[in-house]
Structures are given as structure tokens and as C-alpha cells.
Amino acid sequence: MRAMKIGFAACLIAALGLAGCTTNPITGRSQLTGLVSEGEAIQGSAKAYQQMMADLDKKQKLDKGGESESARAQQVQRITDRLIAQAIKFRPNAASWRWEVRVINDPKTVNAFCMAGGKMAIYTGMWEQLKPTDDELAAVMGHEISHALLDHTRERMSVAQASNVGVQILAAATGVGNLGGQLMQNAAVVAIGLPNSRESEAEADAVGVQLAARAGYDPHAAVTLWEKMGKLGGSRSPEFLSTHPSPENRAAKLKEMAAKLEPDYQAAKSHPPVAQRYVNLKLGSNERVVEPPLGANERVVKPAPAPTSSN
């Protein structure tokens, strides 16, 4: 009887995974994203980001905004604004995301990330240890933005959700109980921080260099960036490499893609797109972000409807 329960549980978990698969409209790849809605992924990421930034702010680990913004904060904001203008051509509804980017003061950490909904951060170790050019920073941020565009965050959240449900089912079937189930659920959460798959990395590379080139940044900088990271090595190996595995042929693939994008880069460099602000916008109490029409390439903010008075 116990074997039958375990077999049923395994089948149910497999069916759950199949039911949650959707086709990514940008890559055409089937992804396990259906167990977490886009809204849930964005909301969950926003809450996690807010908590993380609040904790870092208490420790005085964040560059301050407004008039006291550091040169690094201004630099990364300028670069990401140009990248986002290209990103929303791939995914128009991303224009309505509440894009944010912060600089985390940690000179020992070489890392960056972009969560669902455009919540981004980059560590000062990128500057301290790599001495990046604007083009190389664009390669970093373009790659990270691509992870969000391609629903990689949502995909990993769905995997965790499937694991959580599966753990509960197996715990009941095997008699592990709530304690064992909770421990395994915690392990599923930890799995979110494990290295990205080579497939998702290849996708983020391909889209990231396109964003950079079309924003007027040299796509070949992605190659020099990885070369710099590789030279750190040893005990100084960048944290970025722990979550962004680098197969041996990565540099060759990036060089090939950069060569194909050279005309796009030269065209954007000759005629720079008009600057548009997307990151760290402060909305008033009477405003709301609305989704732009298909193909729009700018953030649209309209006044919220006035409340109706009751008679």
C-alpha cells in the first residue's frame, strides 16, 4: 500500500510539472512557469527586493539616491535606462514594470542581478575588481535584464513551487510528516540560489548582447568582461560565476553573436536613441503605471481615475 502511495505521488508531481509548462514567446522554449503567475512573480520579487534593500540600508551598504547619488549610481542608471528602452521592444509590457537599480557597497563581491519586474542591483566589487568600461557594464546589466525578460526568475519560482507541493505529497505518502516536509521545502528555497542552467545562460547571453548593441554599447565587451572575470580566479573568483556558469565555448559564442550585431551597434552609435528615464521613478499618489500598447518603447504614466463621490 505504501509503494502504491509513493507511485501515485510521483505521478501527480510529474503531471503537475507538465501542466505548468508554457512556451516562451521570445525564445520558443518550453518553460515551467505556469505554477506562478507573472503578477505573483513580480510581487514576490518586489517584496524580497524591498526587504533586502532595507536591510542593506540599515547597514549603510547602499549608495544614497537623489542629490547625493554617487558617480557609480548615476553611471549604472544611465546605462540601464538605455538598455531598458531596447528591452521593452522584446517585451512591451515590461514598460510598465517599476524598474529599480541600486548600487550595493561591497567591494569584495563581483555580482549583479535582476529579479522579476525589473528589480536590479550591482555590487561595487564590479568596479573595484574589474575596472569595467561603460560597454562592459552594459554587458553585465543587459545579461541580467534578459533573465527577467525571459521569465527565468518566474521559471525558478515555479520549480520551487512544484518542489514545495511535491514535498508535501511525498511527505504524506512516506509518513515523513510536517517536520520533514518543512525541511525539504527549505531546501527547495535554497535551490533558487543555485547556478543558472546552461540553457537559460545561453538565452540571456543572446538577448543581452542584442540589448547592448541596439542601445549603442559595443557587444564585443561581453567577451572582454568574461575574460576579466576569468583572470580573477582562485580565492577571488567572482560570485557572479557561481550563479552564472561559464562553459568553455561561451567566449566563442559571444564573439560570433557580437560580430553579427556589429551593424546594429554602429547604427545606434551613429544615431544615439533619445534618453528616456525608466529606473527609480517616483510616482505621485494620483498616478499609476499602465501597460503601453504593443510596440511602444516608452514608459506610460497616466493619472489614476478620480474617486466618485456618493450621494
Image (spheres, helix red, strand yellow):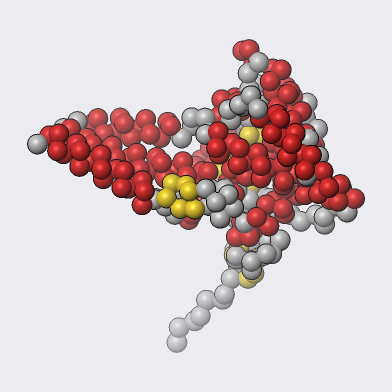
Q: Image height check: is 12 above or below 285?
A: above
Say which residue appears at 59% left-offset and 36% top-offset.
201
**Residue 35 location (% of width, % of height):** 39, 50
Using the rendered image of the protein, determine whether residue 5 is visible from the camera's viewpoint.
yes
Residue 251, percent from left and from top = 70, 29
- Residue lying farthest left? 1
Image quarter for residue 177?
top left
**In the rendered view, does 99 fall on the left or right side of 217?**
left
- Left or right? Give the position of 291 relative to 180: right
**Which quadrant does the C terminus fall into?**
bottom left
Q: Position of residue 92 (x, y in %)?
A: 63, 60
Q: Residue furthest right?
A: 270
Image quarter of the N terminus: top left
The total of numbered circles placed on residues is 0
Look at the image and tell me whether residue 63 can be seen.
Answer: no
Residue 236 vs 223, above or below: the answer is above
Q: Residue furthest bottom?
A: 311
Say which quarter of the image contains residue 65.
Answer: top right
Residue at 51% x, 80% y: name it. Answer: 308
Q: Residue at left 68%, top 40%?
A: 141
Front residue of 42 and 71: 42
Along the horizontal axis of the image, is 293 left or right of 260? left
Residue 72, located in which quarter of the rendered image? top right
Residue shown at 36% from the left, 46% from the top: 17
Q: Judge from the rendering whether residue 41 lies leftward or rightward of residue 185; answer left or right.
A: right
Q: Position of residue 75 (x, y in %)?
A: 78, 40
